[in-house]
């Protein structure tokens, strides 16, 4: 490393540490645990800050209700539009930011964000000035959850990975829209991704956004070379960590998008360290060995791991050119996943159908075997019976012939022709010539006599 580059790096490092000491903040903190979020992330206290009416700012046309939180970039309040009677988020520049051009940067970032008319970018409603001269920004109050909180609450990094890849694709599409309008975010991270109550994905935290020139020469409002370090070191690309603003283009957002992707896959950010100096050192040197090791051990598809490594390449030339190209790659990967799932489902259904057909065939075969077995048994029984009848008839026929032969010889077997006793003929009844008197029993009285008639 040349002496000039080393001195410039040390100057950038010391400037950042001085700024960190002054603000006691490192990057934008997590949003509040409430279900309401401003279009910028803020340092959370868990509940809205208990502020009295005297501590709340006076915003013309708005009734400030409470403070959501604050960061080095600004303070965010919940307010009510007195004209339309609905809740909004009001942001003001932070009091602890040491830059002299804080208010001008605040106004410039608000105007840049207002030009991004995209469903993934929260709309800006108003930009004005308080009675004391400080600017304020009125934006949409988002109801939902932060991506960082959802990733932290997962039991394992593999949980709902397909769903988070869908969210990541929508983030890439939103940033691709900004890149198409020559706007770069410069501070993308899970804390700057919000998922609404109905699944809508919005990219927030445009406080460091800048506009690129129409060509690829770099930012049209490029910061001076001696500007203190900006962004979040845990996700920062090497050229941004080294303060090489002439190399800052759309690929810095591609690197930070890769940081979101690696946190989806592994549950940890790009760079991990105990101190800010350690994080900045890893980011400036492009030390991605630990991050790549975690990617190799996550167990995801090799195609997706290769895409994440390409986004996190220390050399900007090896990354996708912008978020549009990255979104196309992610969409193609998800399409391949859908195709594989459809193919797997078709194979499963085909296997089920084949198994069912085999089961039906087996049942038919068993039924045929049963019918055939019964037919064989019945046929065998019939043949046996006919053979038995034939055998009996032959035996009887032989016995009859033997009997006939013995009868012709006069030899009659006693068991076939036995002498029968002579039957006496039954006498025929005599004709009755006169009326026979019935035999009278002693105990029966005789009938009365007929009276004789006189003889003429």
Image: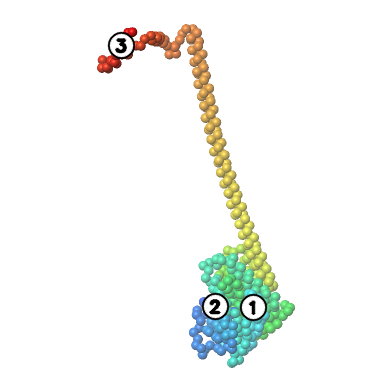
Q: Is residue 392 left or right of residue 229?
A: left
Name the residue located 67 percent from the left edge and 76 percent from the top edge.
178
Residue at image position (64%, 83%) is 110
Residue that numbered label 2 is attached to: 36
The secondary structure type at the circle numbered 2 is: strand
Residue 225 visible to the viewer = no
- Label 1 SS: loop
Tag shown at residue 185: 1
Q: Residue furthest front?
A: 456
Q: Give the number of the mark in front: 1 or 2.
A: 2
Residue 11 figure quarter: bottom right
**Front residue of 368 and 73:** 368
User: Closest to the observer: 235 or 241?
Assistant: 235
Q: Is residue 428 above or below residue 201?
A: above
Farthest residue toward the right?
215
Q: Helix, strand, or loop for circle 3?
A: loop
Q: Is residue 111 left or right of residue 278?
A: right
Q: Are circles 3 and 1 on residues that touch, CB within 8 Å?
A: no
The mark that comes first in sequence, 1 or 2, is 2
Pointers 1 and 2 in contact (C-beta within 8 Å): no
In the picture, residue 325 is in which quadrant? Answer: bottom right
Front residue of 240 and 135:
135
Q: Is there a contact, CB below 8 Å, between mark 2 and mark 3?
A: no
Which mark identifies residue 452? 3
Residue extending furthest left? Answer: 443
Alpha-carbon neighbours of circle 3 within 10 Å: few (<14), some, or many (≥20)? few
Q: Nearer the viewer, mark 3 or mark 1?
A: 3
Q: Residues within 10 Å of mark 2 (few under 14, many from 20)?
A: some
Disc number placed over residue 18 in the picture, else none: none
Precedes in sequence: disc 3 or disc 1: 1
| Quadrant (top left/top right/bottom left/bottom right) for the C terminus | top left
């Amino acid at each position: 490393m040349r002496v000039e580059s080393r001195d410039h790096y040390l100057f950038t490092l010391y400037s950042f540490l001085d700024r960190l000491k002054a603000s006691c903040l490192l990057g934008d903190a997590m949003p509040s645990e409430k279900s309401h979020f401003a279009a910028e992330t803020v340092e959370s206290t868990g509940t809205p800050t208990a502020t009295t009416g005297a501590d709340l700012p006076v915003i013309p046309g708005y009734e400030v209700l409470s403070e959501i939180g604050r960061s080095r970039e600004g303070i965010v309040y919940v307010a009510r539009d007195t004209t339309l009677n609905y809740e909004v988020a009001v942001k003001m520049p932070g009091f602890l930011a040491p830059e002299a051009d804080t208010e001008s940067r605040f106004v410039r970032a608000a105007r840049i964000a207002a030009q991004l008319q995209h469903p993934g970018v929260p709309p800006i409603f108003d930009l004005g000035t308080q009675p004391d001269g400080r600017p304020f920004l009125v934006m949409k109050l988002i109801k939902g959850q932060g991506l960082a909180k959802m990733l932290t609450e997962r039991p394992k990094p593999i949980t709902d990975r397909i769903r988070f890849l869908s969210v990541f694709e929508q983030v890439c599409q939103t940033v691709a829209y900004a890149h198409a309008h020559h706007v770069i975010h410069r501070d993308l991270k899970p804390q700057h991704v919000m998922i609404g109550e109905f699944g809508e994905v919005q990219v927030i935290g445009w406080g460091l956004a800048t506009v690129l020139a129409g060509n690829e020469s770099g930012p049209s409002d490029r910061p001076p070379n001696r500007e203190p370090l900006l962004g979040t070191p845990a996700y920062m690309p090497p050229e941004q960590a080294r303060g090489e603003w002439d190399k800052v283009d759309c690929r810095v957002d591609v690197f930070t998008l890769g940081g979101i992707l690696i946190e989806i896959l592994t549950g940890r950010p790009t760079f991990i360290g105990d101190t800010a100096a350690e994080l900045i050192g890893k980011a400036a040197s492009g030390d991605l060995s630990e991050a790549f090791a975690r990617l190799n051990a996550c167990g995801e598809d090799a195609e997706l791991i290769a895409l994440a490594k390409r986004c996190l390449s220390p050399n900007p030339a090896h990354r996708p050119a912008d978020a549009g190209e990255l979104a196309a790659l992610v969409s193609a990967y998800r399409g391949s996943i859908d195709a594989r799932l459809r193919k797997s489902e078709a194979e499963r259904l085909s296997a089920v159908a084949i198994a069912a057909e085999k089961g039906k065939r087996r049942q038919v075969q068993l039924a045929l075997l049963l019918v055939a077995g019964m037919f064989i048994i019945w046929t065998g029984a019939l043949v046996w019976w006919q053979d038995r009848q034939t055998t009996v008839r032959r035996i009887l026929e032989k016995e009859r012939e033997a009997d006939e032969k013995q009868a012709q010889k006069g030899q009659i077997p006693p068991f076939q022709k036995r002498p029968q006793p002579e039957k006496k003929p039954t006498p025929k009844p005599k004709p009755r010539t006169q009326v026979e008197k019935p035999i009278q029993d002693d105990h029966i009285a005789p009938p009365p006599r007929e009276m004789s008639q006189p003889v003429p």
